Amino acid sequence: MAAKNKRRVTLGLILAYFPLAFAYLSFSGQIGAADWRNASRAPAGLAPDPATTPEAVVQVYSARAVGWRGWFGVHSWIAVKRSHAREFTVHEVIGWRLARNGTAVVARNRAPDGYWYGSKPELLGDIRGAGVDAIIDRIEATVKEYPDPGRYHVWPGPNSNTFVAFVLRRVPELRVDMPPTAIGKDYLGWKSVGMTPSGTGGQISLFGLAGVAVGVEEGLEVNVLGLNLGIDPKSLSIKLPLIGRVGPHKPPPPVFLPAPQASSRK
């Protein structure tokens, strides 16, 4: 009898969580405009001005997705600027481009920190310096190796977050902890074991539907039906489905990488 009552209480708490989470999102300002056609794409002031920033830059962003999907998760992208380049190139996966172009992978010049159809972006990672040009080479090579350019599924993946996580695993210098609301980041295809997106830990995942991840940057995350719940001791925060990170998490400061030293033979 006691076990049955506990199950009822647990189920009640789960059912109560979702309307509370939706209410929180309604008043938090995270969700973008209802009409995507008139929604803002203006820069949010999180990216450096290429005209006054000669060094190479790589930044990773996420923002609430368009329409009803924004209540559940985010869209992610990677922005790169080589040394002395006059503009950023943004690499991302966009589902509606698949039917038009035959590939969901898009590379274009746009504001790296632009609002995603009314949703303010969150800066997830920022590295700069003379040593970043070589990292950009690896990022762009990895973009070409993305295994699912002709497939897109909002849930559980592959999608925009799957794409960004794939690149991040190949470029662990970025050490990016993707948001718990980045549905699809844990999608590993037919693989069941892999590195966490930050490259600082490992994870077990069943097609992005269930799994566990442990990493220095991620902390501990449990994935149930693509929704993540976890705790991050490094930033003293908790990770909740729909809501995202709760705690004193701050945008990462720029990390400056020196130019790699040329090896010498004695």
Image (cartoon, grey):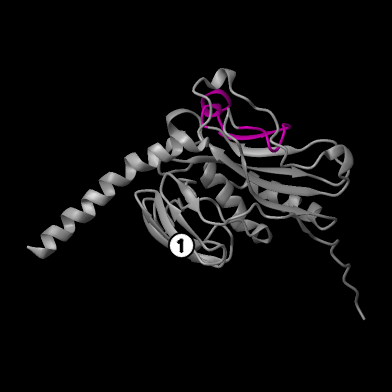
Residue type pointed to by label 1: Ile
Q: Is residue 67 left or right of residue 117?
A: left
Q: Residue furthest bottom?
A: 266
The answer to which of 134 and 114 lies nearer the viewer is 114
> Magenta segment: does it hold 242?
no
Coordinates of residue 224 in the picture (x, y in percent): 35, 53
Residue 152 in sight from this viewpoint: no
Quarter where residue 243 is shown:
top left
The residue identified by callout 1 is 231
Please state the total of marks drawn on the protein image: 1
Quadrant holding the N terminus: bottom left
Coordinates of residue 97 in the picture (x, y in percent): 56, 27
Residue 122 in sight from this viewpoint: yes
Q: Is residue 218 above or below residue 228?
A: below
Q: Residue at x 58, y 26 (%)?
A: 101
Q: Residue at x 52, y 56 (%)?
A: 247
Q: Residue furthest left?
A: 1
